[in-house]
Amino acid sequence: MSTLALATAGCTALPAVEPPAPMLSQQRNPIGTALDSYKRWLSRNRDPAAALDDDKALADNIVSWQMPHGGFYKMPAWYQAKWDGVAPRSGWSGADGVELGTIDNGATVAEILVLADVYGRSGNPAYRYSARKALEFLLAMQYPSGGFPQVYPARTGTLYSNLVTFNDNAMIRVLKLLDDAAGRKAPFAGDFFTTAQRERMHAAIDRAVDFILKAQIVQDGVKTVWCAQHDPVTYAPATGRSYELPSKSGQESVLIIAFLMSRPQTPAVAGAARSGIAWYRRGAVQMKDTAFDPAATRPACANPFVHRPGVTAWYRFYDLATDRGFFSGRLPTDRPPGVGKQYDIMKIGAESRYTYQWGGDYGTRIFGYADRVGY
């Protein structure tokens, strides 16, 4: 027997190891600034010591408003003073009157960021403890399917809050927070979160990506974008408030795509992102030389979609089965009452027409980055 045969006799070949999925450059990815708004909560005093004193007072107030389950409500104005021990700490309730925390309008996410920022400058362990408790709230609210609802625990009476909520980028903000925290990116340096918590963050992100991939809307056999709300079990697009009907969302889908482009680019993830970008590039969904400008048109009660050379706009909502944009007035039973789904924005009430974000230059936000990385 040859030397080579002796050396290999009885050996079993090892399975091939799959190379890790590639990562895209994150320079100019719109997801990179998704959490920056919390910085507006911080002191603008140019004296570092005075600014820290201001921010510690804010952090102390935030800690006092935290609910027993770890979450917060969406009223940062409340943090101008400490909780008095009596006032409601949430505007929403669930079974048995439990007060609900939320991720709506950046709530809970922003509080964690502020606490981390001030902890990094002060070292006060109370801020870290509060943020860890808030993180547990976020991890607890995630559905087994991977989606995040708007509130936790479940809200009674108003069921849309219990849907998986991409609306106003709520779920994507949570995922960006988890990703930054798991990677110890600023302001989450060092041991701000525990090793066990960071491991659970990775698992939560993986489940969320799985939900996103399964929830992507298919039109005529082609993957497109996402709705603002999805059912946590069936993944189907769902109604939010009465004027937020099941649709392909021109606004919320941008940061969903951007988040997918921050993940390892497996064939499934890359395919979903590319399909979403391709939908935004469809001529049928674009309004060339058009801008949504309600502030300028409201005084004359004119159409808020105006001619603007060089600007492209997309609708907030598109029919699920087509690329036709639509609007929706509030229902007759709502206050103020409305007229339901319409394809002419001038047929919905003026209050809805000029106060809701019915359109914007949404796709433009992702195109530059997509072109840069070859998507």
Image (tube, helix red, strand yellow):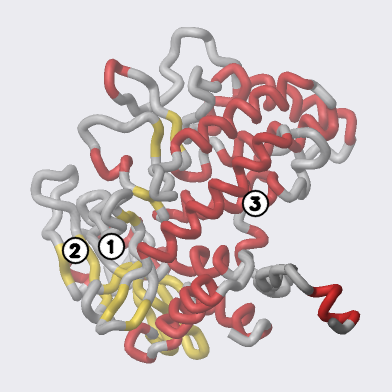
Identify the element where label 2 is drawn: loop
Q: Could one spot residue 131 in this view of the protein?
A: yes
Q: Which quadrant of the view contains residue 18?
A: bottom right
Q: Could you tell me which residue is drawn at 60 percent across and 56 percent down?
A: 34
Amino acid carrying mark 1 in the image: Arg
Q: Label 3 is placed on what type of residue?
A: Asp
- Quick check: marks 3 and 2 in contact, CB under 8 Å? no
Measured from the top left, where is residue 330 in percent x and y? 18, 53
Whether pointer 1 and pointer 2 mark residues with C-beta atoms closer than 8 Å, the reply is yes
Residue beneath disc 2: 348
Amino acid type, residue under disc 2 in the picture: Ile
Residue bearing mark 3 = 179
Residue corresponding to mark 1 = 353
- N-term mark: 3 or 1: 3
**Is residue 28 among the parts visible in the rendering?**
no
Q: Is residue 364 above or below residue 172?
A: below
Image location (x, y in percent) of residue 78: 53, 26
Q: Nearer the viewer, residue 121 or 155?
A: 155
- Left or right? Give the position of 234 relative to 59: left
Q: Residue at x 32, y 49 (%)?
A: 232
In this image, 231 relative to 62: left or right?
left
In this view, 58 is above or below 311 = above
Is there CB contact under 8 Å for labels 3 and 1? no
